Amino acid sequence: MCSLAINLNLSVIFMKTKIIGALLLPFILAGCIGDDIIFDEVDAQVRFVLWVDTLGVDDSFQFEVRYTNQIGEVEEPALTWISSDTSLFTVDDTGLATGIAKGDAYLVCEVEISDRPTVRDTAFVVIAGETGMQNLATERTGTLKTTSSYVLEGAFKLKEEGSGLVLELESDYKASSSLPGLYVYLTNNPNSTNGAYEIGKVRTFSGSHSFDISGVNLNDFDYVLYFCKPFGVKVGDGKFEN
């Protein structure tokens, strides 16, 4: 009888623990989630990643773009290249532009996807005596902002260094230290870590510091994302401004 009573008491305690845990779980999650509702979809976009702003008469240059779909994944859809004035320069279906006569014109690259708005990017091109330098940026900058109840702020810089990249957080950087597993990512979809590049766990919560990055290129991603990994919840982000 004694052992039966003990077993019954243990069963009651176990059931109470499960009930309490179930009741507390929403509050635990709320502490990380707050009142934010996250949607994974973003606007598709096409963006020039290699271009010149001056094209020489009788010179040719291969323009390049990058397209990301509505969930931030890089794709290679059919591209439509358009010269705003074919008497000044022409462009073929690969993005190879050739200067014809001096003047100013626009180069447009469009992507048409069924049941979705057409997306495009436009480059202003001066046709002159000779082709200018390629627009190959060696660094990109942005500013972090919180999208939750947790602190996240500060300027950042992604730059080429050696054969890799370095993400530098500036002296005004601040992040909450109360989250159980805050990670930083590079991504094209600031609402999700799907398809993102995981830089690493956040171990510094104020002041300047940096992360070494390898295996990706400077223009592969458009956002820096801070994510509460154990709960799968976004904390904040920063978009590259260039």
Image (tube, rainbow, N blue to C red):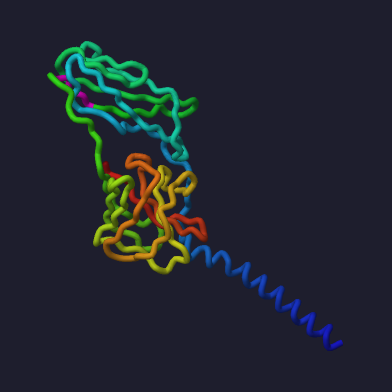
Look at 46% across and 26% down and name the residue there.
Answer: 113
Report x, y in % for residue 88. 20, 14
| Foreground of the two, 44 or 166 | 166
Report x, y in % for residue 156. 28, 53
Q: Give the range drawn in magenta.
A: 124-128
Q: Is residue 131 left or right of residue 6?
A: left
Look at 40% across and 45% down and name the residue there.
Answer: 215
Is residue 132 highlighted in magenta?
A: no
Q: Name the image quarter holding residue 140.
A: top left
The quadrant of the picture occupied by the N terminus is bottom right
| Foreground of the two, 28 or 121 | 121
Report x, y in % for residue 172. 25, 61
| Foreground of the two, 199 or 10 | 199
Look at 76% across and 82% down and name the residue there.
Answer: 9
Q: Residue 44, relative to residue 91: is it above or below?
A: below
Q: Which residue lies furthest to the right in this view?
A: 1
Q: Is residue 122 left or right of residue 42?
A: left
Q: Name the image quarter holding residue 184.
A: bottom left
Q: Residue 103, relative to residue 158: is it above or below?
A: above
| Foreground of the two, 150 or 34 | 150
